[in-house]
């Protein structure tokens, strides 16, 4: 019985016609076509704005390291010359200048990073840039073809007169000597006849533009290939100003794992450390998510989920942004009220455009319903019946929410700067952690917040004044009207700290102490203990500093209580906050293996049929054959005897139709076929494989014998 | 007759002059230079059909050979065999450069893809160009690569003179000895010439060639002595020593420049430079910093700032996502623990060790880390992962993706097996120190779970 030639042999992949997906079709599919279209446009607009902001951030973040790198690549061959005079020999570089760019392990982001780098190199340093990826370069020949292809076919390099060169490059042998001859041809004559080219090569670039070769993923290169390529390049270092850029994901030590010292001594490396991706993420979160600029917000669960995917799985900001994009899309797609989500300025117009069914959908939102229930009966009717009135209320709510956001974030930053340096970090070190807490619940009610406040109440004067100063800075210059009072208030509190020593110690303090000492003499031991206990219970007299500190902390506490209320407590918060974490999880962090196992173990979960509905662990003949076979195989060890398996299968399937003894022969054949098909399917799913260790057996691939 | 003699004597004088020049640029290579020159003889004289020159890197094989060839303008072709990834390129490169073709004009490039054609065309080209009166030299650098090409190449090159009936000499340059080349048959033994390693004194002699002009010769010699005394234990490579000497000289000369010490005050200068050289000793051969960056680093250390990029631990430090760390730890445990002991480490009541297994353990002890990582199945790694990781982790696609990204980072290695898809096997490629530092960041005591250390 050969199950080895399985279904997979009969499977062919047909590409089929590629259907262009039109987002409009999707939005149309939902209840109201008109509202669908407008939601789509709002969605596009929101994403466009956010995307633009992200692009700017990306450019800013890498600018420092890229500037260094560009400076390095353009300066390392400054003395290069093709005129081989004896006195020039001294100035020659004998090693290949190499920039080791340590990028961090977030490999999904690297594609974008390197394409930006190459673009910048093109613009500012040299038109001769080649980007090599390990997957294209498994032979020296391929490396050279790739390199030369990118360098010679460079459109920037060819002015009209050089057209013949382009056509000829195809037939040239793919070696660096070709490149060297070409380079010599191109740049040797200082006075080129073409004015146009001269202006290009001298004004933007140096006379001899360096040849920059960028290795995107150095770790994945085949060591032998890389070594050969470097050796070849170093042979031409006198004729070609070659610069390498190594993209290293882990650490510089990787270079030495790949290259023996004979090769690494041909290089002259300089290390460039790219900023870690966490820094980029913090930037994205601070500028995109934690701002009142964009009305769209992530709910606590989704925010936490996206963060977890980042921190636990890939460190990839690109994936985080993709997740954010997905959230936006899903929000506008699945939530009808999302239509009214817009910028503050556009709000009146949007509300005006609302149709009856839009208002109906707003009335259906849970938070609005809660509001209706809590309002007096007369208003309830108005809210549910009168569209104009409801519109007014909606507008009010929306602007209330907008204002809340405007005040929320400065105060949140203020809270963060107070608690971020506390011992044990009750509210977390990062701003995002504090934010995620405030999203979930009213932060001032949480245990962690109380702990933090307690800790603040124990601070020394220096620390506290320092924190206050930074919190004032944190509130910023262009402060919102409602928050205008806070900085002056804090300043005045700060001043009181300075004048603290001028306040005289209160007199009662000493009096009471004297009193107690007087009394002590007369009491016996038992009473003394009692008294001491009472004294301990009594609140200690506070020093002026302690009093002031208490006042300051209380001031902050009130501030936070006023502005940092949980967004969930507002009516219509659903419009702003997207919080269906289950959807996001299913899409972005799915687990295919458990889905397959659920399908096989409890087919009812997906089939939704009555017949399969039963307790887990029971094998019924009503289940699909595949499930029966799967469940039977779970009971086996590493190797499964096919015949026993078939017997068990037959027993299960025929258990309810034993009376039809007569047909047994024919039934067996059909059953056998069904069994074989199920086994093949199981193999196709990767649960078993044919084995040569024992005849008529298959091997389990999942936990056999464990 | 007299003309020839006259020319010959003139030639002799020129050769002698040149010899002196050459000896100046390449000190300590007199015997080799003399031998080569006498082997080459007059221009029209036949040279030994093939020469084999070997010696360590940086002993001047290529430099001496090319210098002689260039100086006398002897017709020659220089080919680096690393570059020739196929034999076709080797043939075409030789023929084209003999032909004097510019590489950018593809129209009249010679095409040649086997030895037979090569021999024929070589004859043709040399006759065409009228250089068949003189010895043509074909220099093949990194000749050890020729062994990896077709079997007939090396024997054919060795007897090229015989095959082409031309006045040609093939010079093979290599770092390994001739004995390692004898793999097939049909070899015509070449003339073997060895470029021996330099002694300490010779090294100093050579490095003195580029002593900075603003300093005294003795001063620089003193310095080189110091450098050699520190580095000679780990490194005899002229190139590397040269690099190191250049890197640290500014620092050595600093007290003299500032007037703190005189050029004769060697003791003081030594005290000054010693710590720097010791530090540089850690990074010999690494070439991880350029001299400008090295200077910057030294300055920042002096300014009291903690060095940003230094020390071996920081060199290999890698920040990984949380689950990747645990996956890596699990992979390490799976690679270095015998599968039998998993039960003991990760099952709740599996701590029993019988006497027999204790004996076995003693036998196996310390061997796991000596033997290197063993391959393990994916399932085993995942089981260990779930045992060591905190909290419940769903087996999501992201987790499995992390395994492949660990492979692409070269922290895990894919072991080739007969079925890659059904039951892939991996190896953990990181060191114990690395895994220790990783597990420290997640508060996991990896040593308690390693069979070799419990």
Image (tube, helix red, strand yellow):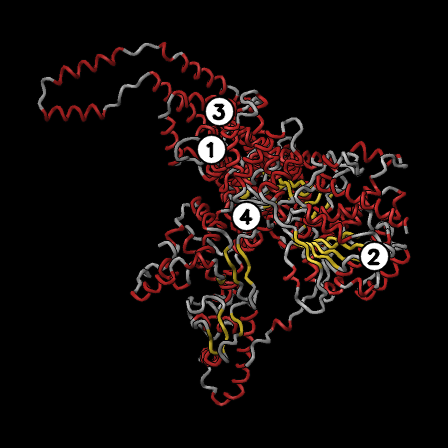
Q: Which residue of the protein is positioned furthest toward the bottom in this rendering? A: A662
The residue lying toward the viewer, choosing from B141 and B429, is B141
Q: Indicate which disc, 1 or 4, sits on the residue closer to the N terminus.
A: 4
Mark identifier at residue B95: 2
Count of numbered marks: 4
Residue at x-position 47% and y-position 58%: B372
Is A530 situated left or right of A231 in this image? left
In the image, residue A48 sits, relative to residue A219, either above or below, namely above
Please tell me if label 4 and label 3 are on a single chain: yes
Location of mark 3 (residue): A471
Coordinates of residue A578 in the picture (x, y in percent): 55, 43
Q: What is the crowding at mark 1: few (fewer than 14 residues within 10 Å), some, or many (at least 20)?
A: some
The residue lying toward the viewer, choosing from B133 and B12, is B12
Q: Under tag 2, what secondary structure?
A: helix
Q: What is the crowding at mark 2: few (fewer than 14 residues within 10 Å), some, or many (at least 20)?
A: many
The residue lying toward the viewer, choosing from A445 and A493, is A493
Coordinates of residue B327 in the picture (x, y in percent): 48, 53
Q: What is the crowding at mark 4: few (fewer than 14 residues within 10 Å), some, or many (at least 20)?
A: many
Location of mark 4 (residue): A314
Please tell me if label 3 and label 1 are on a single chain: yes
The residue lying toward the viewer, choosing from A340 and A19, is A19
Which of label 2 and label 1 is nearer to you? Answer: 2
- Chain containing mark 1: A
Q: CA distance from mark 4 to mark 3?
A: 33 Å
Location of mark 1 (residue): A565
Say if mark 2 contacts mark 4, CB within 8 Å: no
Coordinates of residue B61 in the picture (x, y in percent): 69, 49
């Amino acid at each position: 019985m050969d199950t080895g030639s399985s279904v997979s042999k009969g499977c062919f992949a047909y590409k089929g016609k590629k259907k262009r997906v039109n987002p409009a079709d999707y939005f149309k599919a939902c209840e109201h076509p008109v509202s669908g279209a407008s939601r789509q446009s709002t969605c596009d607009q929101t994403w466009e704005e956010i995307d633009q902001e992200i692009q700017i951030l990306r450019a800013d973040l890498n600018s420092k390291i890229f500037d260094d790198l560009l400076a390095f690549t353009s300066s390392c061959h400054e003395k290069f010359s093709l005129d081989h005079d004896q006195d020039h020999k001294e100035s020659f570089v004998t090693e290949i200048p190499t920039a080791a760019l340590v990028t961090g392990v977030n490999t999904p982001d690297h594609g974008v990073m390197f394409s930006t780098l190459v673009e910048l190199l093109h613009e500012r340093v040299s038109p001769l840039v080649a980007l090599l990826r390990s997957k294209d370069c498994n032979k020296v020949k391929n490396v050279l073809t790739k390199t030369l292809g990118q360098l010679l076919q460079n459109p920037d390099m060819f002015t009209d007169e050089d057209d013949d060169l382009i056509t000829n490059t195809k037939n040239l042998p793919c070696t660096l000597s070709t490149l060297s001859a070409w380079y010599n041809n191109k740049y040797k004559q200082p006075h080129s006849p073409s004015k146009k080219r001269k202006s290009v090569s001298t004004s933007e670039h140096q006379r001899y533009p360096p040849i920059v070769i960028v290795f995107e993923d150095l770790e994945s290169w085949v060591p032998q290939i890389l070594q050969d390529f470097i050796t070849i390049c170093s042979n031409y270092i006198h004729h070609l100003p070659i610069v390498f850029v190594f993209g290293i994901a882990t650490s510089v030590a990787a270079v030495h794992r790949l290259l023996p010292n004979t090769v690494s001594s041909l290089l002259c490396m300089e290390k460039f450390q790219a900023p870690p991706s966490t820094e980029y993420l913090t930037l994205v979160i601070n500028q995109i998510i934690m701002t009142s600029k964009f009305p769209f917000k992530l709910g606590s669960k989704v925010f936490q989920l996206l963060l977890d995917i980042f921190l636990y799985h890939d460190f990839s900001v690109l994936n985080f942004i993709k997740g954010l994009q997905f959230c936006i899309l899903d929000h506008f797609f699945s939530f009808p009220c999302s239509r009214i989500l817009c910028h503050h300025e556009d709000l009146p117009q949007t509300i005006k455009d609302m149709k009856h069914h839009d208002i109906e959908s707003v009335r259906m939102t849970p938070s609005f319903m809660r509001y209706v229930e809590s309002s007096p009966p007369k208003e309830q009717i108005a809210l549910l019946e009168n569209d104009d009135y409801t519109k007014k209320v909606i507008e009010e709510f929306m602007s209330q929410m907008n204002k809340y956001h405007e005040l929320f974030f400065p105060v949140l930053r203020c809270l963060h700067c107070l608690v971020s340096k506390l011992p044990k970090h009750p509210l977390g070190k990062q701003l995002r952690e504090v934010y995620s807490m405030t999203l979930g619940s009213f932060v001032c009610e949480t245990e962690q917040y109380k702990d933090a406040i307690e800790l603040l109440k124990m601070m020394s004067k220096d620390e506290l004044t320092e924190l206050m100063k930074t919190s004032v800075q944190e509130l910023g210059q262009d402060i919102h009207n409602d928050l205008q009072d806070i900085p002056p208030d804090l300043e005045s509190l700060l001043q009181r700290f300075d004048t603290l020593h001028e306040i005289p110690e209160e007199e009662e303090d000493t009096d009471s102490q004297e009193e107690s000492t007087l009394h002590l003499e007369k009491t016996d031991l038992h009473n003394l203990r009692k008294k001491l206990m009472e004294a301990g219970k009594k609140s200690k007299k506070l020093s002026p500093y302690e009093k002031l500190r208490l006042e300051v902390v209380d001031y902050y506490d009130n501030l936070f209580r006023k502005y940092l209320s949980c967004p969930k407590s507002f009516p219509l918060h659903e419009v702003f906050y997207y919080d269906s974490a289950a959807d996001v999880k299913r899409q972005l962090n799915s687990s295919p293996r458990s889905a397959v196992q659920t399908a096989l173990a409890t087919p009812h979960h997906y089939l939704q049929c009555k017949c399969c509905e039963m307790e887990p662990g029971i094998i019924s003949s009503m289940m699909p054959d595949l499930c029966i076979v799967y469940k039977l195989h779970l009971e086996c060890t590493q190797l499964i005897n096919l015949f026993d398996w078939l017997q068990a299968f037959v027993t299960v399937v025929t258990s309810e139709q034993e009376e039809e003894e007569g047909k047994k022969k024919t039934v067996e054949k059909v059953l056998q076929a069904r069994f074989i098909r199920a086994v093949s399917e199981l193999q196709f799913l990767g649960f078993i494989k044919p084995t040569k260790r024992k005849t008529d057996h298959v091997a389990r691939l999942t936990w056999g014998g464990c | 007759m007299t003309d020839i003699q006259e020319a010959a004597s003139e030639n002799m004088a020129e050769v002698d002059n040149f010899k002196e020049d050459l000896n100046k640029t390449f000190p300590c290579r007199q015997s080799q230079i003399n031998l080569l020159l006498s082997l080459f003889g007059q221009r029209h004289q036949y040279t030994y059909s093939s020469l084999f020159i070997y010696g360590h890197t940086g002993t001047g094989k290529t430099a001496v050979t090319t210098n002689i060839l260039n100086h006398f303008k002897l017709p020659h072709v220089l080919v680096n065999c690393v570059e020739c990834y196929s034999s076709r390129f080797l043939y075409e490169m030789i023929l084209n450069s003999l032909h004097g073709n510019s590489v950018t004009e593809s129209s009249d490039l010679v095409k040649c893809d086997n030895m037979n054609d090569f021999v024929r065309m070589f004859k043709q080209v040399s006759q065409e160009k009228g250089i068949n009166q003189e010895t043509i030299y074909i220099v093949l650098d990194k000749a050890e690569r020729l062994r990896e090409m077709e079997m007939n190449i090396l024997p054919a090159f060795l007897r090229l003179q015989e095959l082409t009936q031309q006045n040609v000499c093939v010079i093979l340059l290599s770092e390994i000895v001739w004995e390692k080349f004898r793999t097939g048959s049909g070899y015509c033994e070449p003339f073997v010439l060895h470029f021996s390693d330099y002694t300490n004194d010779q090294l100093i002699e050579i490095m003195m060639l580029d002593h900075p002009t603003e300093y005294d010769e003795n001063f620089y010699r003193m310095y080189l002595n110091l450098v050699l005394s520190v580095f000679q234990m780990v490194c005899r490579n002229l190139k590397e020593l040269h690099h190191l000497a250049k890197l640290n000289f500014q620092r050595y000369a600093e007290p003299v420049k500032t007037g703190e010490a005189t050029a004769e005050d060697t003791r003081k200068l030594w005290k000054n430079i010693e710590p720097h050289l010791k530090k540089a000793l850690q990074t010999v051969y690494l070439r991880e910093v350029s001299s400008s960056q090295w200077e910057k680093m030294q300055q920042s250390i002096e300014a009291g700032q903690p060095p940003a990029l230094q020390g071996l631990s920081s060199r290999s430090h890698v920040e990984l996502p949380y689950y990747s760390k645990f996956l890596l730890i699990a992979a390490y445990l799976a690679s270095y623990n015998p599968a039998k002991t998993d039960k003991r480490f990760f099952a709740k009541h599996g701590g029993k060790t019988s006497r027999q297994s204790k004996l076995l353990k003693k036998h196996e002890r310390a061997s796991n880390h000596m033997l290197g990582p063993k391959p393990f199945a994916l399932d085993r790694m995942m089981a260990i992962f779930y045992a060591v990781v905190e909290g419940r982790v769903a087996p999501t696609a992201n987790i499995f993706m992390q395994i492949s990204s660990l492979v692409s980072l070269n922290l895990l290695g894919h072991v080739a097996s007969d079925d890659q898809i059904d039951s892939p096997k991996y190896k953990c490629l990181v060191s114990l120190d690395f895994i220790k530092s990783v597990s420290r960041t997640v508060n996991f005591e990896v040593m308690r779970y390693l069979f070799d250390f419990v």
